[in-house]
Amino acid sequence: MSKTYIPSIGLEVHVQLKTQSKMFCACPVAFGEETNSLACPVCLGLPGALPVLNEGAIRLTLRTGLMLGCSTPPVVKWDRKNYFYPDMPKDYQISQFDLPLCLDGGVPLYDLAYPKDAQKTIARPGKVVPLTRIHLEEDVAKSTHHATFSTIDFNRAGTPLMEIVSEPEIDSAEEAVAYLNSLRQILVYGGVSDADMEKGQMRCDVNISVRPPEQKQLGAKIELKNLNSVSAVRRAIRYEIERQIDCLETGEPLIQSTRRWDDDAGITTQMRTKEDAHDYRYFPDPDLMPVLTGTMLEEVRPWVPELPHEKVERFVRDYGVTPYDASVLSSEQVLADYFEKAAAGATTPKKIANWILNNLLAVLNEQQLGIADCPVAPEKLRALVELQESGQISNLQAREVFADLFVSPDQDPARIAQAKGFEPADTGAVEAFVDQAIAQNPAQVEEARGGNDKMLNFLTGQVMKLSKGKANPKTVSELLHARLRG
Ligand code: ZN
Ligand code: MN
């Protein structure tokens, strides 16, 4: 490569909303049901069937807009996007053209949302990718292609689909990954969608153009389709940037076109060019009234949850955990909730955080369980950590107690410790050792009395030795303090 080129990437993300029923009829939204069992005349696009708006879907979209700082036009409307395709027999998709539910706003890119190997070299930490719009439309049916024929399942037809369109201001494949992961995290937080790409609940098209640095306007926009996972998005973008640069270097013209990502081959291939680009002939759907958004927006506002980055700030401020730990804890709402329940009223919430991040998650991972399935109640974890913090059991012993607790979560951590013989050495014995240490080291005792902390530490060490390491250093130093300085 002779010079540096500037890639401009924009993402169009389709998200299936978590509603009970479909966008324009009362058919339930469900997966894995018998083929074509969830379809009515509206789903099938039969002549004369009339759509009825799903208010819940509108509210979820408005909630998303509020979470992402979008604005909403006072009146929004519905338009027909006309095209023929076997999985959409009425020959148009009901969508929103010039008055969508949300405009502007942005998606904050979280550090931990970048690919692991790219988290140390984030080009613009704290970047927010601006959005163009978010609109609401209906999903189409699902076709399956067999050797000599195709089948269509209408169960998916009419599922509320929210389309989130970003500005072409993503600079790299790694930022695109961060965008998708951050967006998913926010959507899940908001209860808007499960946004699982592997399940097709979140689908992504990518626009990429590349231009030399001296050129102001963007290069030819090339769209990538068929990206079914976050890792596919990353690989496809990296491939496509290189391909476009090669074209520019060798003088091959780049034209606006749509390409398909071949995940197995790891390449993109041309599907269609600008010449046969669609002209959708949008026009307002005469069957649907425009929607006034003012009142609904105010009703939705209280449902906007605390967002991951807001939680991170609060955890750092209120619990004294590091920003990194706070980010891991906030990566999932369930995990954040677990931590907060465990930390409630704890002497050192930071220790609770450490315990969750260093031990609990590792055990869950081993057992292939999510935090939602953690058998140990947060209150029990707090009791265990307090047991360790008060010096009654060591870190190693605490982990043993936890292993037992994991199997029989109804038990009491203190009881388990007791049953295992993890009782702290009794105070009487420790006091005897303290007496002994004081008697054996008169010079050091004098200095310690006079305020020499080093000598106090030395004496603590002596008592520990006498107890053969069984005494709790915290108790010993407290006893010594009381005796020499009290
Ligand atoms: Zn239906
Ligand atoms: Mn769309």
Image (spheres, rainbow, N blue to C red):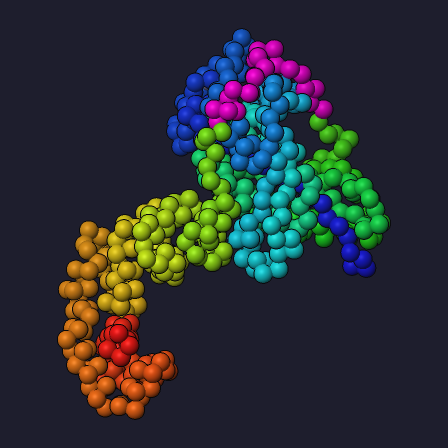
Q: Identify the residue shown where x is 76% and y is 47%.
A: 210
Where does the C terminus fall, quadrant-wise?
bottom left
Residue 229 x, y percent position in the rendering = 54, 45
Q: Is residue 12 visible?
A: no
Residue 433, by quadrant, is bottom left
Q: Is residue 419 above or below residue 448?
A: above
Residue 404 x, y percent position in the rendering = 22, 60
User: What segment carries the magenta color?
Assistant: 279-300
Q: Is residue 38 above or below residue 449?
A: above
Q: How many marks?
A: 0
Q: Is residue 59 above or below residue 113?
A: above
Residue 375 x, y percent position in the rendering = 27, 50
Where does the N terminus fall, quadrant-wise?
bottom right
Q: Is residue 435 visible?
A: yes
Q: For this view, does 307 lie left or right of residue 101?
A: left
Q: Identify the residue shown where x is 21% and y is 81%.
A: 434
Magenta highlight on residue 350? no
Residue 444 x, y percent position in the rendering = 31, 88
Q: Identify the residue shown where x is 46% and y is 53%.
A: 316
Residue closer to the observer: 272 or 433: 433
Q: For this view, does 179 lie left or right of residue 156?
A: right
Residue 456, by quadrant, is bottom left
Q: For this view, does 440 lie left or right of residue 280?
A: left
Q: Identify the residue shown where x is 56% and y is 25%.
A: 137
Q: For this view, does 165 lie left or right of residue 49?
A: right
Residue 225, by quadrant, is top right
